Structure formats: structure tokens, C-alpha cells
Image (spheres, rainbow, N blue to C red):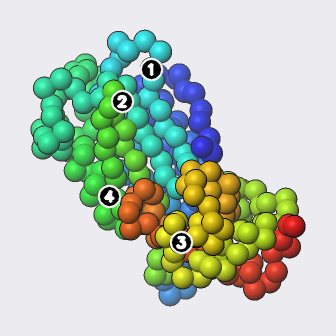
Amino acid sequence: MLDRKDFAGGIVADIDDVMLFIDRNTRTGWRILGLQRTDVPEYPTDGLREAVTNAVMHRDWWEVGANVFVEVFPSRIEVSNPGGLPRGLTREELGTRSVRRNPLIADLLNRINYVEKAGTGIGRMMEAARRHGCAEPRFVSNGFFTTTFWPLRDIGDVRFPSRQQFGLLERPKSGPSRDQVQVLEFCSEPRALVEIMGLFDRTNRTRFRDQMIRPLLEVEWLELTVPDRPRSSMQRYRTTDEGRERLAGGLGERK
């Protein structure tokens, strides 16, 4: 997790402060059209605002000690509220009808134009993500209701500063190990985790992923081919352009 902060300024102020918090902790890319540069946020801002507002509106306020969480990770943003789906609403009905857990709060947010008509929130989040070019958000209900957003990647004429440039991640104080260099070289073509493990005759997936793969993902020298589904059976690992540049220039590997 990159950052998490507590807000207690009231419902409306908290929504606005959370959006500023997200803006501070995510990157802004750019697109050049002719002689003009246009800023492009990393995440669909309209969809995130809808998710945060819905989390505040639909949370279970009687759940003592539980709060709305907005957590910014290197690869995603999660917005969670306690209470799961309101009583009377099934997972299959999500996005097609609405059950107001907190009518007074819902009416307040509607009067100040923070939400539109009931039942449109899920659709608006999905549409905002599609319009922005991101993968559709994922919705999970298991005591908490969690909405996960995925970032916009470098595509076409849109470019983002690296996380090191942005200051979200520090560059390693020392180079990668010889084994990690071998991983980067091997993953010049997309490789499955079991293929990479086979290089070192390793069998413990969790330990290998934590010790060898995750550090390379965090500094963006390695990337997932299916970033919105980290546990996908089709998942492959691929050396990034920056990883290849580092290999070409010498990584100062550790013994």
C-alpha cells in the first residue's frame, strides 16, 4: 500500500478530501495533439468519485469500528465500505436496481448533486472506466463492499512518468541479484510463473513470488500481461521497456 489517511471533516468534506488524496497519490500522464499537451489522469476520476460517494452513502453506519477505506496500491485503487450489499439487493441485481441503506444521506447527496438517480452508480463507474480506456472495475461483497479500479497504461499517444520519477517508489539502493537479472533476461518473452521457477528448480510459489518476482514488479522492471487479474491462469510475466533498458545499460547486479 502506498498511502492511507484518515478524514473526519463531515460527509461532504470527506468526499472532496478523498478525491484530493487520490489526485496527490496517482500519476498524471499526457497526450500531445499537434502543438498542445493534454493532461490524462491515471484513473477515471468520475468513476472514482462515484465509488467514494456511493461508499459513504451505502455504508453500514451501525458497524462500530468500521469505516470507508480508500487505499492506493501500486497497481490499483480499492474503495471499501462496511456492510456489503444492502438487505434486499442480490449480486445479480447489482447495477440494475437500488436499495437505499441510508435514505437521509442519499437524499442529502442527491440535493447537492453528488449523486444522480438511484440505481445508476454501478453503471456510471463502469462507463467512466471504459470511456477512460481502463479495465472495468471489479465489485466484491463479503461483509465489506469493495470496488477495485485499475489504472490506464501507456497506450497509443498517452504516456505516464515512471513511479520512480513520480516519487511513489524508490529505486533500489543496490542492483538486483544475479537470479533477478536472469529472470529479466528470460522474460524478454512473456513467461508463466512455473516456467520462471523452473530456471531455479524452485517449488514454493508464494516464497518465490515474494522474494524474486514482487521486487521486480514494484520497480516496474517486470510487468503482468493480465494486470487486472493477478491470479489469472493466463498470467504471464514480461520485462518492461525500462527493464530492458536497464539490462542493456548494466544493472550493477549483486553477488
Mark 1 or mark 4, which is nearer the start of the sequence?
1
- At label 2, the amino acid type is Phe
Q: Relative to 9, is 183 above or below?
A: below
Q: Could you tell me the amino acid type at mark 3? A: Glu
Image label count: 4
**Residue holding disc 3:** 195
Position in image of residue 108 (x %, y %): 28, 25
Position of residue 119 measured from the top left corner of the image (x, y, whole percent): 17, 40
Disc 4 crowd, CA 10 A, few/some/many (<14, 14-19, 20+): some
Q: CA distance from mark 3 to mark 1?
A: 42 Å
| CB under 8 Å between discs 1 and 2 | yes
**Can the viewer see residue 21 in this picture?**
yes
Residue at the image position 57 percent from the left and 27 percent from the top: 6
Residue located beneath label 2 in the image: 144
Which mark is drawn over residue 136? 4
- At mark 2, the secondary structure is strand
Q: Nearer the viewer, mark 3 or mark 1?
A: 3
Q: Earlier in the sequence, mark 3 or mark 4?
A: 4
Q: Which corner quadrant holds the N terminus?
A: top right
Q: CA distance from mark 2 to mark 3?
A: 36 Å
Residue that appears at 68% across and 54% down: 211
- Which corner quadrant of the image does residue 90 belong to? top left
Which label belongs to residue 66?
Answer: 1
Q: In the rendered structure, which disc, 3 or 1, sits on the residue that comes first in sequence?
A: 1
Helix, strand or loop at mark 1: loop
**Label 1 – label 2 distance at C-alpha:** 9 Å
